[in-house]
Amino acid sequence: MVSAQAVFQAPTQKSPEAGLSLSRRRLIIRTVVVVLAGLLLAGAMIVSLGRGSKEIPARDVINALRDSDSVAKSTYIIVHKVRLPRALTGALVGMNLAVAGTMLQGAVRSPLADPYILGVSAGGGLVAAYIKLRIPDAPPHAVPTGAFIGSLVGAMIVYLVAWDGSGVTATRLALAGVALTTAFGAFTTTIVGMSIQAGGQVIFQWMIGGLYTADWADYYLIAPYTLAGFLLAMLLATRANVLALGDEMAQGLGLRVEWTRFLMSAVAAVLAGSSVAVAGLIGFVGLLVPYVARKLVGSDYRFLIPTCAILGAALMVWADWSAQVFFPKLLDGPDTSIQFPVGIVTAVIGGPLFLWLVRARRAQW
């Protein structure tokens, strides 16, 4: 006679072959998503290198990248000296912000977590603006280092304000982040206003977020932070997966929960701070990209982090190209030389998503 327990368990039992097939199918889907994201990034790079005030065919762009002697000197200069460093810097900025958003969302277990929303970028922006304007003789790496410290302090303040002894809620997190961003933004504006003769107008553009002056120096400045931040994020991927199970479960499995949260926030501060130092206060990339990536590859951080990195890079390159080419032509005609800040483009895309997440009350996992 078959027991009732066996009857209820029988339909849910799966053979090892079925489990292996499901795991293999999931791996194939994730691999396809990563490949498609890579193609999206490659297409963005080709378009950004070829289309601008002077149109360069894709074939000439590829030839310029492969062999400088095979194209005209003017084409080589435009591709290598102007557009390539801007596109590469933008890709690294997008990668940093997307991975930073992923780490923050995992640390606080809320899809509303974003370096811009939580005050992380604002903290880095305040310190970076102070160094840029008040300490003009500071070495180049002082800006991203200071921005990292400011970003980490901002993240810690928001988390401590939102903490009630048992955890954080998305409402308190968002309110604390908005309050801190407003306060830090006021301080940054004050510093800029006091230094208007020392490049304050450029800083105003930097506060909105843009890649107007991005060059090879900016690329080499941000690249080490991108590499270090990405590797550290991947090393924390397994811990992040355990943390996603909940504090009690994670502690039961031997995870040091608060220490893991601090490490994830520190990695996010490294990535966000270096991006702020180079490109200014660009918002909502860390909100939009992780949301899309989770829909595509799930919540396993071993796959989520690389997917976010590639999609973030692709989004930023496409957004910057739209800011400097598409939107000016759309609004002012083909002969305009006006460039929009890329921060406006990302805000137009990510702002409605943030409002929808709040409205839909999907602030907790």
Image (cartoon, rainbow, N blue to C red):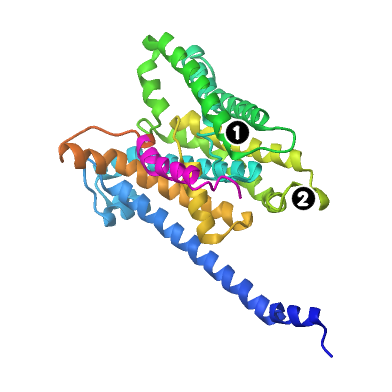
Q: Position of residue 61 (x, y in %)?
A: 30, 51
Q: Residue at x 52, y 24 (%)?
A: 140
Q: Is residue 119 visible?
A: no
Q: Distance between the Cα atoms at labels 1 and 2?
A: 23 Å
In the foreground, 160 or 264: 160
Q: Residue at x 57, y 55 (%)?
A: 304
Q: Is residue 60 visible?
A: yes
| Magenta segment boundaries in residue numbering | 344-365
Give the position of the N terminus as an image quadrant.
Answer: bottom right
Would you call the spot at circle 1 few (<14 residues within 10 Å), some (14-19), or many (20 or more)? some
Any mark on residue 6, and which?
none
Indicate the amino acid at tag 2.
Answer: Ala
State whether the magenta stretch is mostly helix, strand or loop. Answer: helix
Residue 348 on the magenta segment: yes
Q: Residue furthest bottom?
A: 1
Mark 1 or 2, closer to the camera: 1
> Is residue 159 depicted above or below 28 in this figure?
above
| Res 20 quadrant in image | bottom right
In the foreground, 358 or 240: 358
* Pointer 1 or 2: first along the chain: 1
Q: Is residue 100 found left or right of 255 in the rendered image?
A: left
Q: Position of residue 278 (x, y in %)?
A: 46, 31
Mark 1 — residue?
Answer: 172
Indicate the amino acid at tag 1.
Answer: Arg
Q: Residue at x 52, y 20 (%)?
A: 183
Q: Position of residue 90 (x, y in %)?
A: 42, 41
Any mark on residue 250, and which?
2
